[in-house]
Each structure stands twice: as C-alpha cells, then as structure tokens.
Image (cartoon, rainbow, N blue to C red):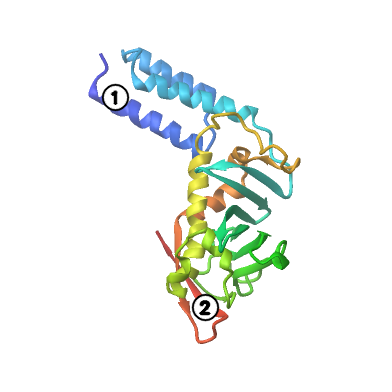
Amino acid sequence: MATKEHKRYARGLIEGLETRVHAGPPVGDAEILSAQEFLRQNDFSPASDYYDRLVRIKDRLATRVKEPSRPPGKRNYGGEAGGNWMQLQSAYDHVILSTCHEGEFNQKRGRVKISHRFNREGRIDFVELKFLRSLQPCLTGEIRKLISVKDYQTIRKDWDAAETFVLEVLPRELLFLFQDIFRCPRQEVLGWLINVGHGLADTLLEDLREPPVDGCNCRPGGNGEQLCLHAARVDDVAVPILEKATRLECAVEELSDPKLMVVRYVNR
C-alpha cells in the first residue's frame, strides 16, 4: 500500500513531467519507465490515476514525434482554436495572429480579417484590418492599420509605454467584432482592439497544449503551403512570443492629436 509520502513524491514527479511536456526540457522514455517502476515498487493500485497520467504523457510525446518539423524562415499555420478559425504567421522575431469576422449592416453583408502583430517580447506592433468584403464595395481588398506603434521596428522590444498611431475614423465593419462597439468611448475601443489580440493568443496557446481531436488538417481549399495550426506547438519562435503575450494587457491614453495615443503595458 502506497504511503502518504510515496503519494506526495509521485504527485510531484508526474506534475513535473506534465509541465515539461508543455514547457521543456524534453521528457525521455527512460524517465517515464522509471516513474512507472516507482509506482509498481511502492504498491500503487493499477487503477491509480498516476498510471493513466503517465500513459497520457507518453501518448503526447508519441504524437509530437509524428509532427513534421517546421521549415526554416517564415511559417504559416491555420486551423480551429477556441471555436474560431485562426491563422498564425511566424517569422524570425515576431508573429501575426489573424481571425476573420463577418456580419450584416443596413442589409449589406461584409467580412473582414483582423491581424495582430506581436514582437518577440509579446508587445503589439500593430493591429490591421483587411476588407475581405467591405460594406463599401470600393474598399474590398484594401488594408488599414487601425493601430500602429511608432517606430515599432527600431524601439526596444520590451517597452512599457509607446506613442502609437491610430486610424482617425475606425471602419464601420468593426461592428462584426462587437455590435455595440461604437457606443463605447473611443479610448476603451482602442484599448480593447489591442487586448482582444492578447486574449486570442491565450486561447490559441491553451488549444495548442491539447492534441488535435480530428487529426491535423488545414481547411479544404486553403493555402497549400499552410501548415496545420497544431504544428505550431513546436515552433520555437511562435510559442515563446505567445506565452509572453498572454501575460500582458494594455491601457491607452489619448492625446490631443486624434491620430495619436500612448499605449501602456502592465502584467495581468
């Protein structure tokens, strides 16, 4: 019969292995066998949850071995996460996380793609909108930077506050994200547009920690070079950036110039 001390040790051992499956360093097969042997030697019941958790760890590792290694340079991933279709682009020292939104206004249908670019420290570089189908047909295919950090390519990457350009007149299509968005104070809207990206990073990261239920397939008819979204779990650029982004949220301060504001970051 396993003692309380044995149970305490087993719990710490297995929790440590589970943490390393997500965050590293890699777990070796010998470590799993050693943990199973510890359970047997100390009379843990074969029905114990500890055995099941070790099996799940082993299955997760086996799944990762089958995942294709990421190609060098830029990577483009797509798939379902948190009930939404997401696109993740990873390149050298930043990621771009995108989602699509559609809806109707004044009996007109529209669809937009919202993209958040995060630097290597998880800070926002810009929030961009692409009109996939605009309420004004002449704008279809056009791109607008809703929010763009001033000199984001050259400022220090772990900035706490930065002057930021904003689009003076925000597109009507933002109604597709939140129906009452234009009833909110402009300052709140601008802060929300950034923070929603950090929330999406959190949702995506949580989803990547779980193995895909129905395999690892891209949307039919999509980009042939696009990788399955779950393949991003082994992307050594994207994952650290997403982890940093999930720990941050911002507040914004409007300036006298309607095209400028200050973004300030705090830890969640």
Q: Residue drawn at (43%, 70%), measured in percent from left and top?
A: 183
Whether residue 106 appears in this view of the structure is: yes
Could you say which quadrant of the image residue 4 lies in? top left
In x, y percent, where is residue 112? 62, 58
Residue at the limit of the structure toward the front, as seen here: 107
Residue at the limit of the structure toward the bottom, as seen here: 256
Q: In which quarter of the image is the N terminus?
A: top left
Q: Residue drawn at (53%, 65%), measured in percent from left and top?
A: 158
Could you say which quadrant of the image residue 3 lies in? top left
In this rendering, would 218 be left or right of 194?
right
Residue bearing the label numbered 1: 7
Could you say which quadrant of the image residue 39 lies in? top left
The mark that comes first in sequence, 2 or 1, is 1
In this rendering, would 41 be left or right of 263?
left
Say if 145 sits above or below 36 in the image: below
Per the image, label 1 sits on a secondary structure element best described as helix
In x, y percent, where is residue 154? 65, 71
Inspect the image, locate mark 2, and give the three-letter code of the amino acid beneath it.
Met
Asked if the residue under mark 1 is in contact with the one under mark 2, i.e. CB atoms within 8 Å, the reply is no
In x, y percent, where is residue 14? 40, 29
Front one among 245 and 36: 245
Front one among 167 and 24: 167
Q: Residue drawn at (55%, 50%), measured in percent from left and top?
A: 240
Residue bearing the label numbered 2: 261
How far apart marks 2 and 1 lie (CA) works out to 55 Å
Whether residue 121 appears in this view of the structure is: no
